[in-house]
Amino acid sequence: MDQGLGRGRGVSASKAADFAITGIGMRTSLGHDSVQSCASIRAGITRFQEWAAFGGSGDDVLAIVGSAVSPDLGDRDWVEKFEELTAEPLQEAIFMARLHTLLDADSRRRWGVYLAAPSLERPGVDEENAESFREDLRDNALFPMEPSEIRLLSTGHAGFLTALRQAMRDLAGGPLDVCVVGGVDSLLQTTYLDWLNQERKLKVADSPSGLIPGEGAAFVVLETLDKARARGAEVLALVTPIAAAVEKESPDGKTSSPGRATAAVLRETVAATPCDPLRIHRVINDLNGERWRFLQWAMACSPALSRLAPAWRLWHPADCFGDVGSATGAMHACIAVRALWKSYAVGDAVLICNASDSGERAAASVYSEHRAQSR
């Protein structure tokens, strides 16, 4: 990120504007679309099961509990699983927003894809797969419908909100008419799991504090509210500008004052949400079993969210589908949008906050166009 507390420049926010979400799509271990996935999460359903054994033989075998999509895509890196993970949610989001009709009717419309994804240099990524992916990216051949622009961002859990911020800037600046913003990841690959285990990030028998690996993809269709209304699109929800900062402390929490950047983006997001803070009853974050995330969240949330409703509720969907890496923020956005759209979220807005291992922190509020009231 280009601005942040870690660089002594404060919190950065996207240009203020009205941005609408007109389509969502998900593929998770809980379902092939947003309806199945969100209903399962709302019901507290999980799909954790032993996924693979590695790290030795006999008594040394390490059992890994994971949350794989169905059918299981096997022991392959995220690049090799890319098309299978993204095809359904991308199509769902595009069709829900009636974007295919818009593009078929007017070929001059410019649209972009902004995708949060892991680094191609991540442990376990096959070199040939990585090079093939780079070629497809250069040739604009990653998706069946060729967008005007594709941007790939690799910043972990906060990657989706970072991508959303860039999409907002480009929509406000005029070169694009609509953006599809999403995230994709799979932590279920033996070499990468071995690396996570060596870093003591996995939840296993001898390390109860850690993540459960998952996989999936999710997308939202983003456009300015004026353009969405002009083409008669259904506005599912609106989204505030993205508050972003960088935590200069190390993720292990051993240095002083952890959570300052998280607190800063939370405060800015509450201030930017166009409804009374007492009408924000839901917060979604990326707690996943790692101790440092809990410690930083505990330090940040009490002072930063003191203006919210006294009984506000925290959702951490990793409890249901595991840690989905770069797909985390996109999953959270889809969950928030559907909860507001279908009116099972109490209040007028859902706040989302994500934290990356590398220090990036980002937050935004998804809010209802019709239910939110000016302060």
Image (cartoon, grey):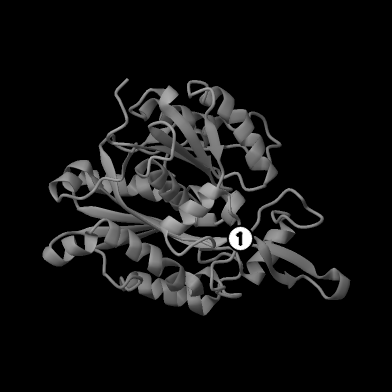
Instruction: Please name the amino acid that badge 1 sits on.
Output: Arg
Label 1 CA crowd tier, 10 Å (few <14, some 14–19, many 20+): some
- Image quadrant in which you'd find residue 13: top left
Kindly indicate the quadrant of the structure image that contains residue 258. top right
Name the residue rendered at 17%, 45% in the picture: 229
Residue 260 position, x and y percent, is 56, 30
157 vs 280, nearest the viewer = 280
286 vs 12, nearest the viewer:
286
271 to the left or right of 60: left
Q: Residue at x 54, y 33 (%)?
A: 313
Q: Quadrant of the C terminus?
A: top left
Residue receiving disc 1 = 47
Residue 243 visible in image: no
Q: Is residue 327 left or right of residue 178?
A: right
Q: Position of residue 172 (x, y in %)?
A: 23, 43
The outermost residue toward the right is 59
Instruction: Identify the residue at horizontal 48%, vertical 52% (top origin).
Output: 39
Q: Is residue 220 above or below residue 309?
A: below
Q: Residue 222 in the image: state x and y as whole percent.
A: 29, 50
